[in-house]
Image: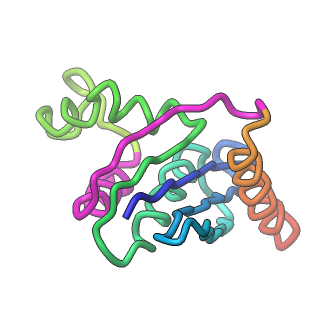
Amino acid sequence: MNVTLYSDGSSRGNPGPGGYGTILEYIDSKGILHSREYSEGFPETTNNRMELLGVITGLEALTKPCKVEVITDSKYVADAFNKHWVEGWIKKDWRRGKSDEVKNIDLWLRLLNAMNPHQVSFTWVKGHAGHPQNERCDKLATSAADSIVKDI
């Protein structure tokens, strides 16, 4: 099955209240589009953590191996795979250079695990540029972050 995973993260402060928004879409054998949305807010997080968690949530929601195209406006996430940063981090025991530890290792490991049964590719799109699903993910992410702000 071919799935498109759209995702965005948001943080009101960095760190601060944040959220992610994710949309999974696939077209069945009859040509019918199926779509599911996910979002959640967190009281103390960063934008990068929310970008990662959005992709993780979408992948973890899949119940069988799929070919997945991840569409994100996060260079942090897309470049980590498209520019092979993750491979380098793993070879260097999750270090950037000689001493700097990679941030968010817990989520990178969770993402790699979530990717494991799937064929995953990453496509970067410019944020806030009118891409309908990216705009929807942004709305889901910011609404989730704002709901946390109201609770604080």
Q: Residue at coordinates 36% horizontally, 78% vertically from top-left?
A: 63
In the image: residue 128, left or right of residue 119: right
Residue 25, position as x, y percentages in the image: 56, 62
Look at the image and say whether residue 118 sits in the magenta stretch: yes
For the image, the number of numbered tags is 0
Question: Is 91 positioned to the left or the right of 33 in the image?
Answer: left
Does 129 appear above or below 115? above
User: Which quarter of the image is occupied by the N terminus?
Assistant: bottom left
Residue 124 pos. (x, y %)? 53, 32
Which residue in the rendered view is the most extreme toward the right? Answer: 150
Q: Would you identify the image quadrant in which residue 125 lies?
A: top right
The reply, left or right, for residue 97 in relation to residue 74 is left
User: From this viewpoint, which residue is outermost toward the front?
Assistant: 30
- Expressed as whole percent of the image width and height from the top left, the position of residue 103 reads 39, 41
Image color mode: rainbow
* Magenta stretch in the rendered image: 104-129
Please tell me which residue is depicted at 65% across the width and 28% down the height of the picture.
Answer: 126
Whether 45 is among the magenta residues is: no
Left or right: 123, with 143 as reference point: left
Instruction: Please say if 99 is above or below 103.
Output: above
Q: In which quarter of the image is the C terminus?
A: bottom right
Along the line of sight, the residue nearer the viewer: 123 or 88: 123
Above or below, 136 relative to 97: below
Horizontal and vertical percent for residue 37? 65, 68
Residue nearest the viewer, comparing 6 with 147: 6
The foreground one among 19 and 117 is: 117
Q: Residue at x 78, y 54 (%)?
A: 142
